[in-house]
């Protein structure tokens, strides 16, 4: 049984649970007032709904007097709730009141049992959630929240923090895959609008993404990019490779490297300014570099899995003035380190850059720098796809 620490959840869930119960009470109080339960008793003494509304009216009155003692308020309405259940054994509000009137341990058992009869009632499901949290049953917490939010997605703001704390636990991942399978709109909303924005959740979110599709390409790009920014390069790279393998593209290690920019930093990130830019050619075979005089710096960069040394980078540079060819250079560094471990200026035509040794980092950052000095012509260069070849 997967578990989640109830102390960590107590603050988050208390707000959501209390709000759920209070809103349910307010709604039912209005219904009870409109239906005039006293009159209902006189006209329809056998009507279970009349007893249910009367029970909640009594409960609401007592709860308003002492909001810190909901159990006491529920006990004051217990006899009416029993009458409602005698007429309708599936009366959700009556089941909730009876559960709430019990001591804590018995209340949890009663709420869980009652929830099997009605999975749509907000108050009853709120009590069930309380019981699951108290019993540290993470999988059942996720299941209960799924049942609540399928019917009441408007409570997402209150309950997403609870789900977020559950997602921090790797042992809860199978339950997320099982219950948040995309069969309800709130599933995707949780992943794409809440979880991906929380740094502590992104590694486990990536694991879930390896198991099932979530959202669209924008979500995938954001997750890969944010993981890399968090320093989770291995996790980000594994997800990138998985997404690319689904498309049949190359992985982030050796081989012929195209100029795709879909998933930076494991695809290319191009500078795009009016006087200094890089872009892939229409057929995707070449990188087109443009730099007006006085402009320069990193114009394209990407992170790769570190190839096994020794290896070579092979590429061709053309359509550049011969005296400007060396204005384009390649730098290799470990992600997060400012100093490159290799810098090589490119020549016109074919280039083979040998890397005999590399630092002990798992990834390497490849930066293409370009510059057009003041007084020179505008730099226009074209680079072929880069081949990373073992030596």
Image (cartoon, rainbow, N blue to C red):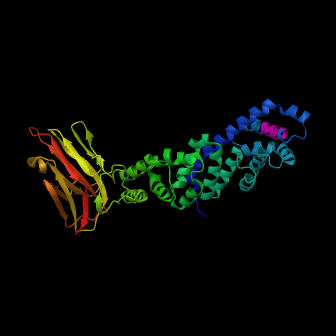
Quadrant the N terminus occupies = bottom right
Q: Magenta residues, as a range?
A: 50-58
Dominant secondary structure of the magenta stretch? helix
For image coordinates 30% across by 49% down, the residue present is: 283
Dividing the image into 4 quarters, which one contains the C terminus? bottom left
Residue plotted at (23% across, 46% down): 288
Q: Is residue 52 magenta?
A: yes
Question: Per the image, is 164 magenta?
Answer: no
x and y percent of residue 217 in the render? 44, 48
Q: Nearer the viewer, residue 220 or 6?
A: 220
The answer to whether 169 is drawn above or below residue 69 in the figure is below
In this view, the residue farthest toward the front is 283
Decide if residue 188 is on the left or right side of residue 312.
right
Can residue 11 be seen here? The reply is no
Can you give x and y, in whole percent of width and height, for residue 108 in the image?
Answer: 71, 54
Q: Nearer the viewer, residue 320 or 137?
A: 320
């Amino acid at each position: 049984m997967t578990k989640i620490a109830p102390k960590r959840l107590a603050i988050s869930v208390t707000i959501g649970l209390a709000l759920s119960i209070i809103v349910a009470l307010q709604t039912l109080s209005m219904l009870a007032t409109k239906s005039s339960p006293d009159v209902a008793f006189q006209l329809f003494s056998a009507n279970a709904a009349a007893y249910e509304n009367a029970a909640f009216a009594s409960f609401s009155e007592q709860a308003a007097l002492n909001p810190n003692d909901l159990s006491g308020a529920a006990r004051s309405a217990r006899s009416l709730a029993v009458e409602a259940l005698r007429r309708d054994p599936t009366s959700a509000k009556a089941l909730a009141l009876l559960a709430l009137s019990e001591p804590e341990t018995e209340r949890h058992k009663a709420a869980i049992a009652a929830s099997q009869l009605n999975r749509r009632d907000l108050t009853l499901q709120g009590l069930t959630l309380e019981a699951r949290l108290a019993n540290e049953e993470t999988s059942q917490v996720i299941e209960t929240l799924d049942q609540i939010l399928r019917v009441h997605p408007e409570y997402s703001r209150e309950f997403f923090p609870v789900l977020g704390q559950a997602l921090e636990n790797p042992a809860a991942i199978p339950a997320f895959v099982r219950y948040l399978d995309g069969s309800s709109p709130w599933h995707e909303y949780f992943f794409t609008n809440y979880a991906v924005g929380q740094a502590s959740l992104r590694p486990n979110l990536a694991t879930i993404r390896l198991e099932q599709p979530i959202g669209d390409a924008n979500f995938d790009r954001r997750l890969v990019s944010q993981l890399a920014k968090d320093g989770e390069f291995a996790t980000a790279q594994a997800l990138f490779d998985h997404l690319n393998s689904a498309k049949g593209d190359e992985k982030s290690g050796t081989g012929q490297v195209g100029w795709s920019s879909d998933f930076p930093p494991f695809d290319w990130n191009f500078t795009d300014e009016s006087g200094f830019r890089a872009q892939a050619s229409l057929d995707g075979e070449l990188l087109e570099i443009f730099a007006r005089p006085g402009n320069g710096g990193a114009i394209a960069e990407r992170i790769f899995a570190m190839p096994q040394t020794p290896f070579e980078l092979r590429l061709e540079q053309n359509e550049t003035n011969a005296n400007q060819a060396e204005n384009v250079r390649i730098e290799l560094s470990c992600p997060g380190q400012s100093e490159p471990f290799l810098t090589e200026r490119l020549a016109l035509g074919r280039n083979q850059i040998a890397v005999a040794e590399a630092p002990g980092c798992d990834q390497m950052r490849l930066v293409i720098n370009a510059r057009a000095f003041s007084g020179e012509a505008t730099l226009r260069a074209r680079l072929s796809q880069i081949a990373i070849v073992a030596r």
